[in-house]
Image (cartoon, coloured by chain):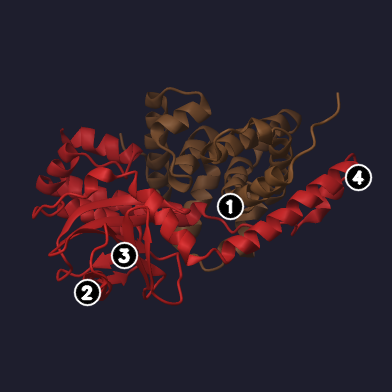
Chain colours: A brown, B red
Amino acid sequence: MSEPVPTLEQKTRFEALCGRLRPDLYRFAFWLARDRSVAEDVVQDTLLRAWRSFASLGDEAAARPWLLTIARREFARRFERKSLETVDVDDLAELEDPALAAQDSQEVLDLRAAIFALERDYREPLVLQVLMGYSTDEIATHMELTPGAVLTRLFRARQKLKAALLGGGEEP
Amino acid sequence: MNCLDVRRTLGAEPGRRTPELDAHLAECAACASFAAEMARLETLLHRALEVPVPAPGARPAALARPGRGPRWFALAASIIGVAVLAAALWSFYPREALATALVGHMTHEPDSWRRTDVPVAPGALAYVLHRSGVALAPDAPLVSYANSCWFRGWFVPHLVVQTAAGPMTVMVLPHERVATPTLVDEGGYRVLIVPAARGSLAVLTQGPVDAARIREVVARVAAAVSFTG
């Protein structure tokens, strides 16, 4: 069966979508992978896959969660092939990246290091909430969790970050 | 709502505001201090998470890895090319589009347009402003509503101020730069966007309120707003 030929209108809409949502998509992929190269690959693969099924996207207001869900699956597919989660935070070259360090205070750099060290279970809902503006219910849908579980992870994530910044133990 | 409930709520959803939460924060200094601490953490978190995004196509070598055929490269390069174009177009997004986005945002919080003389809880206002690195001088018009809203990629203060001409919505937009003031009527709202010390300020009214009145309010708000972050 031959692939359907996209219309000019579809191409224009997709182009606009790429320009608008690429920063969110990259940052989401970056914080999943904690690696710029992997993040860029995930973004490219996500856009390719999104383009193939673009016709199935009815409401463009849903484009961002749709793309982030595809990115999550693309990352999971890579994770099946490579053990990306076994990165040692002390060895992360990303933390030394001048682009990341530029114009940021030491406090922000310390916090970024603490986020790098968070387990993905805590990192992902935090990124979705803080950076993407997702509600608890939206995170629950995205991660296939209950809202209660999402709240617990968000609470624990902030506890861990505060503890890392203050250098003490977590609050009870 | 007790202190433990408040801390659990703010620890998971620092942006959450409810009348019960605001009432507790107004009475409990320890929890108000915790809320301020969480607000500061949120500001830092946002900065830490917002890593720089490389320009599309900045690392095309990734597409040339072994195992990827020329068809993939051509398709991906095409998409990256259009993304570059779209990003460039986005950076020149016209002010009219900003006004349209502001009007679109108004539909999310229709209950905020109340005529009242009751100010919003000081703790809630402080949180909303602090989250975006904004401060408001005491001589600003009475603020009856404050929310930290996700708008075009940033959390920004969404305020409603009470004026002689009725309630007006003020959006503080540190990340939206405009060169000159713009006044437009859109979707039943009158929108005035003006340059600010950082980014811009937008004031919206329901219906065609006299532009001179809107300019007066914008001038008062602009004089009262400062940027701390």
Write down the residue under mark 3: B134
Pick whichever of labels 4 and 2 is earlier in the sequence.
Answer: 4
Secondary structure of the residue carrying numbered label 1: helix
Total of numbered circles in the picture?
Answer: 4
Q: Chain of mark 3?
A: B
> Which residue is nearer to you in this view: A171 or B168?
B168
Residue on which the image places disc 4: B70
- Compared to residue B19, the image places residue B177 above or below, namely below
Dividing the picture into quadrants, the one containing residue B20 is: top left
Which residue position holds label 1?
A20
The amino acid on which the numbered mark 3 sits, given as a three-letter code, is Val
Please report contact status of discs 1 and 3: CB closer than 8 Å, yes or no.
no
- In the image, is A136 to the left or to the right of A49? left
> From the image, which quarter does the N terminus of chain A lie in?
top right
Q: Nearer the viewer, residue B223 or B166?
A: B166
Residue at x 17%, y 44% (from the top left corner): B22
Residue denoted by label 2 = B216
**Same chain assignment for discs 4 and 2:** yes
Q: Is residue A97 visible?
A: no
Specify whether residue A52 is in view: yes
The type of residue carrying mark 1 is Arg
Judging from the image, what secondary structure is the residue with disc 2 in? helix
Q: In the drawing, what numbered circle is on residue B32?
A: none
The type of residue carrying mark 4 is: Pro
Please state the horizontal and vertical placement of residue B47, each as a whole percent of the image: 46, 57
Residue B203 appears left or right of A32? left
Location of the C terminus of chain A (image quadrant): top left
Question: Which one is in front in this view, the residue at disc 2 or the one at disc 3?
Answer: 2
Indicate the position of residue A26 as horizontal and vertical percent values. Answer: 62, 48
